[in-house]
Image (tube, helix red, strand yellow):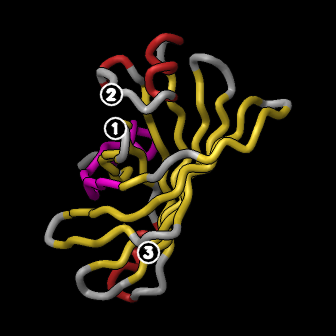
Amino acid sequence: MTAADPLAAPTLSRFADLRVDVGVPQVLGSGPRGLRRVVPITGGQAEGDGWTARVLPGGSDFQWIISDTLSELDARYGLETDAGDLIYVQNRAIRAAPADVMAKLMRGEPVDPAQIYFRCSPSLETTSPALRWVCERMFVGAGVRHPAQVVMRFFTLL
């Protein structure tokens, strides 16, 4: 019998699909790293294997528009599962695309998701005994930005 390679590339397991509703971005101005925007999170849904949750209103996506091709995102919001468990989500992401595509995205216009690199690394916190394991795992994901919603799929790194 051979032991599994402890340094093997991780595999992924689908954790959840999220649809996060967003409001109108608030532009806070330019600084040394670029334009700062805050996008309100107004609601949405999450669905995993055998569970659903609602995205709680009141979160925000803190964005740095670093250049005409690159944005760094830091979204923070809560989920409430159908069982009443609360989960805090902090999701850091990078969104990159050609300048003309990013300009359309910044204006709130629909764009072809295949033209945008949108990858994220969410971290989850909860006090729920049933979901405690999410605090002990790493997650990655991919996303698509629509004019009033962000759609993402989160994966557990195994």
Contact check, label 1 and label 2, Cβ < 8 Å: yes
Judge whether 83 appears above or below 96 on screen. Answer: below
- State the image quarter where residue 45 is shown: bottom left
Q: Calculate the distance from the C-alpha at mark 1 to the C-alpha at mark 3.
A: 24 Å
Q: Which mark is residue 87?
A: 3
Badge 1, how many Cα within 10 Å: few under 14, some, many 20+?
some
Q: Which mark is residue 53?
A: none
Residue under circle 2?
110
Q: Quick check: 16 left or right of 63? A: left
Q: Which mark is residue 146?
A: 1
Judge whether 26 appears above or below 15 on screen. Answer: above
Q: Quick check: 137 left or right of 68? A: left
Q: Quick check: 32 left or right of 48? A: right
Tell me which amino acid carries mark 1: His
Residue beneath the point at 83% across and 34% down: 31
Contact check, label 1 and label 3, Cβ < 8 Å: no
Q: What span is in magenta?
A: 4-20
SS at circle 2: loop
Q: Quick check: 90 left or right of 119? A: right
Tell me which amino acid carries mark 2: Pro
SS at circle 3: strand
